Amino acid sequence: MRRYAVFGSPVAHSQSPRIHAAFARQAGIALEYVAIEAGHADFASRLAASGVDGASVTLPLKEDAFALCGERTSARAQRAGAVNTLIREGAHWRGDNTDGLGLVRDLTERHGLDLRDRRVLLLGAGGAARGVAPALLDAGIRALYIANRTAARADALADALGEPARVHPRGWDDLPALGEFDLLVNATSATRGGALPALPMALAAPRSVAVDLGYGEAAVAFLAWARAAGGAQALDGLGMLVEQAAESFLLWHGVRPDTDPVYAQLRAQADALVSAD
Ligand code: ATR
């Protein structure tokens, strides 16, 4: 049986094994998919010891996975500087990144948004932000403002994206002066620690859509802010999670799964947890 895994830390609560098991049942493919805890120090050795044919890579290992692949990376992984999908090629690994496409698919196909000509605010300039910024630009947005606590990191991401006419790096202190956005994307890890720095309500308009790349507890603070600010929709990252997984599944198995039933199941489970609180 072919064997796959998700590597990260912490990884015990990852939904990826459930998602890939559901896709595999749908496609009639026999596979094993497990979660393997690994940090920077032991990722390479655990990956080698695992004997997997392919792997998903999550926090904090996406840059490590990119480095591990050397030259064998897709154009979209190179633009993100990060790899979330590893494909075995004999003794080597090829790396790709399906995060950005996953986000755009979720927003456009599941939630019916038209991203063309939109004014977008990306909060954060770390690995998660780098993963999604190129795909947002490719989707035809008009402007991408990148706001980060450490302004130099927003500058570095903007430089790497190489589109000065559309990409505008800013510091957190600049937020009150930026006006309204059609789409607000939280790609900071701030809320994982439970603390979202104050965001001006004026960033959101009644038409605005807010999306947190996280889900569960990690998404609560930003989505509560978005609802209080009066935007049209506040979305968590569960849809993106399922869509990026589907794209990885396609790379490994050559079959595109139907994501809707899998998303519906995870959504119901997540909503049940919230109403149980
Ligand atoms: P990830 O891979 O999740 O993006 P990362 O590369 O460590 O993780 O990046 C974390 C992001 O969250 C960064 O943009 C970080 O801002 P800094 O570059 O200034 O560190 C942002 N972040 C983390 N904690 C934050 C906080 N309390 N307030 C604002 N931004 C925060």
Image: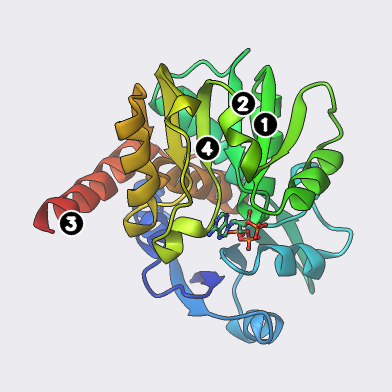
Report if the CB atoms under discs 3 and 4 are less than 8 Å apart.
Answer: no
Q: Which residue is mark 1?
A: 145
Report if the CB atoms under discs 1 and 3 are less than 8 Å apart.
Answer: no
Mark nearer the viewer, 1 or 2: 2
* Kind of residue sitting beneath label 3: Leu
Q: Which residue is mark 2?
A: 178
Residue at coordinates 60% horizontally, 54% vertically from top-left?
252
Sequence-first tag of 4 and 2: 2
Q: Is residue 265 visible?
A: yes
Sequence-first tag of 3 and 2: 2
Report if the CB atoms under discs 4 and 1 are less than 8 Å apart.
Answer: no
* Kind of residue sitting beneath label 1: Tyr
Report if the CB atoms under discs 1 and 2 are less than 8 Å apart.
Answer: yes
Report if the CB atoms under discs 3 and 2 are less than 8 Å apart.
Answer: no
Residue at coordinates 64% horizontally, 69% vertically from top-left?
61
Mark nearer the viewer, 3 or 2: 2
Sequence-first tag of 1 and 3: 1
Whether residue 143 sits left or right of residue 99 in the image: it is: right
* Kind of residue sitting beneath label 2: Leu
Could you say which quadrant of the image residue 29 lies in?
bottom left
Mark nearer the viewer, 3 or 4: 4
- Cα distance between the residues tagged 3 and 2: 36 Å
Regarding mark 3 in the picture, which secondary structure is present there? helix
Sequence-first tag of 4 and 1: 1
- Cα distance between the residues tagged 4 and 2: 15 Å
When the figure is inspected, residue 42 is found, relative to residue 264, above or below; the finding is below
Q: Which residue is mark 3?
A: 273
